Amino acid sequence: MFNPAYVRRDFPILKRQINGQPLVYLDNAATSQKPQSVIDAVVDYYSNHNANIHRGIHTLSQEATELVDDARASIAKFVKVRAEEIIFTRNATEGTNLLMYTWAEENLTSGDAVVVSGLEHHANLVPWQVLAAKKNLELRVVAFDKTGELILKADAPITQKGNLKIGALDQLLDDRVKLVAVTHASNVLGTIIDPKVILDALKKKHLKPLVILDASQSVPHFPVNLAKLGVDAAVFSGHKMLGPTGVGVFWGKTELLKKMPPFLYGGDMISEVNWDKSSWNELPFKFEAGTPNIAGIVGLGTAVEYLNNLGMDN
C-alpha cells in the first residue's frame, strides 16, 4: 500500500521547516524534489567515477561510459522505446528546439501550417512562432473550452489574424498541415490530451504530418508507452521526474532520427573527420555533441529506478 509518510522520508529537503512548519511542496509541475538515492548517485559519480565518456580506455572513462549507457537503457525501458532513440538534452525546451532547427528547418516551406494546442507550455509554442515568422508558415491553435478540454469540432467561424488561426481541431486540419506539436498533459490545468484523438482526426482526413508530443508532465506521473502512442517524437525533462536539473530527453522514431541532420557539431557526434569534410556518428551519438551532463544523466537513470520501485500506478 502506498504510504506518503514513508515516501516523504526519502526526500531530505522535506525535513526542512519554513515559518516553523514542515515544508509542504506542491510545485512539482515546475520542478520536483530529489530523493536521497538520486543525490547519492550524483555524489558517487563525482566522488568515484568522474571522467569523460567514449574518449578513453582508462578505468574511470570506462566506468563513466557504462553508467551513462545503463541510464540510457533504463530510461528507454521506462518509456518503452529503443535505447538508441533516446537523445540526451538539457531539458524538454532544448528537445523542441532540436526538432525545430533540424527537421522543421529542412522540411517546412512557405505556406505550410503548424498546429499546436491552446494548452501548450511556451517551450512548445515559441519555437513554432519563431519558425512561422521566419519561413512564412501558418500557425494554427486548437482552442479549449471552459473545462480545459480541447474543442474538437465547432460551428463557430475560425478566428484569424495574419498567419495565425484559432479554432476547433477539425477546422484546422488540411493538407497544408505538416507538423502537429501538442502537450500530453497541461502544466497549468492538468488536462490530459490523448494523442489518439489527434491521430484519429488526422487519419480521417488522410493527413500524415509529423507529430511531436510534449511529455514533460505525463512521463513523471503515469505510465507512458511512447512506442504505442503513435507519435513521431517526444520530449521530457529530468528535473520534473525526480532527476537533476540540466538533463532531458528528446525521443524520435529511428527512421526519423536517421533522416534528421545533427543539431550541434563537435566532438563525439562525428565518426570521421577530414580537412575537407566529416561524417556523423551513429544513433544516438549523432545528436550529442560535446561532453554531456554525465552526472545529470546518471541521476536521471537513478530517478527512473526510484519511480519504478515506487510504482507508476501510485
Image: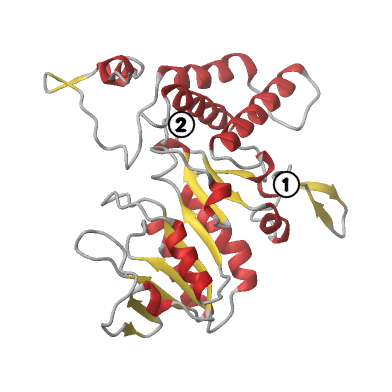
Frontmost of labels 1 and 2 is: 1
Q: Residue at x 41, y 82 (%)?
A: 163
Percent of width and height locating residue 314: 36, 29
Asked whether 131 or 188 is in front, the reply is 188
Residue 209 at x, y percent in the picture = 56, 70
Q: Is residue 194 left or right of residue 177?
A: left
Which residue in the protein does label 2 denote? 244
Q: Position of residue 12 (x, y in %)?
A: 33, 17
Q: Farthest residue toward the left?
A: 20
Within 10 angstroms of label 2, few (less than 14), some, or many (20 or more) residues?
Answer: many
Task: Say above or below: 233 vs 247.
Answer: below
Residue 271: horizontal and vertical position, in percent? 82, 46
188, 286: nearer the viewer: 188
Number of numbered callouts drawn = 2
Does residue 4 sit above or below 269 in this rendering?
Answer: above
Q: Answer with the quarter of the image where residue 99 lies.
A: bottom right
**Local secondary structure at mark 2:** loop
**CB atoms at circles 1 and 2 under 8 Å apart?**
no
Q: Which mark is residue 283?
A: 1
**What residue type is disc 1 on?**
Leu
2 to 107, vertically: above or below:
above
